[in-house]
Amino acid sequence: MTTMYTAIPVREVPYPHGLGKLEYKALENDMKRLLGDRQTDVDTNAARFWDTDYQTLVRRHLAPRFDVAGDIVEIARDALVRAEATGVLGVSYRTTHEARDSYTAALPPRPYHRPPGAAGAVDGWLRNPPQLYRDSAGTLSVGDGRHRLRYLRSLVQPTDPGFLVLVRITTDE
């Protein structure tokens, strides 16, 4: 197994296996109403992602959660700029622990208190980027961060599909 912190174009981010969980219960219920028993199917989510009804639910439920900290597009962009300055982006490590230790050691010291607003959101994305998994067949899936990634994708991909997103990828070998 290898792990690396890297950037990938938003168009290559895998579609979700479903949206909603404890803190997004209303979103989960609305997605179940929209997609039925296929709500957790990746192919269904990919096929319906750009439908007006799907996008309306993404924006209605995720905008209030993420917009409070600032523009998620700028937050993702700033986190990537800061990550690029570490010199360890794109370096493959044998273990997730080794990758996290090396990446974290290259970051500026963590503030004692999380900064408010966008600065705190940038620091949060920088230190805990969305986690993706690549299986032995090369297929990517989302482990953590699917809601951030869905909202970001819905805002940026139509105009900038090459927009780079900071992620952590763990690969089965």
Image (spheres, rainbow, N blue to C red):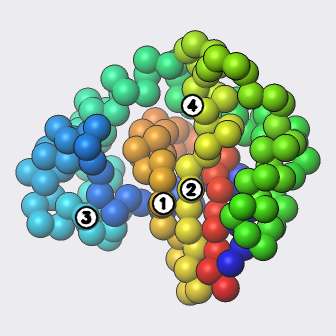
Q: If you read the primary sequence from the N terminus, does the residue marked by circle 4 or circle 2 appear first?
A: 4
Corner quadrant of residue 25: top left
Q: Which element is circle 1 on? A: strand
Up the image or down, 143 lies above or below 95; here it is above
Q: Which element is circle 3 on? A: loop
Up the image or down, 70 lies above or below 12; here it is above
Circle 2 residues within 10 Å: few <14, some 14–19, many ≥20: some
Corner quadrant of residue 96: bottom right
Up the image or down, 57 lies above or below 38; here it is above
Q: Nearer the viewer, residue 156 or 118?
A: 118
Q: Nearer the viewer, residue 40 or 48?
A: 40
Q: If you read the primary sequence from the N terminus, does the residue marked by circle 1 or circle 4 appear first?
A: 4
Question: Residue 129, position in %: x, y?
Answer: 61, 45
Left or right position of 80 against 153: right
The residue shown at (64%, 74%) is: 171
Q: Are the residues at dot 4 and dot 2 in contact (C-beta closer than 8 Å)?
A: no
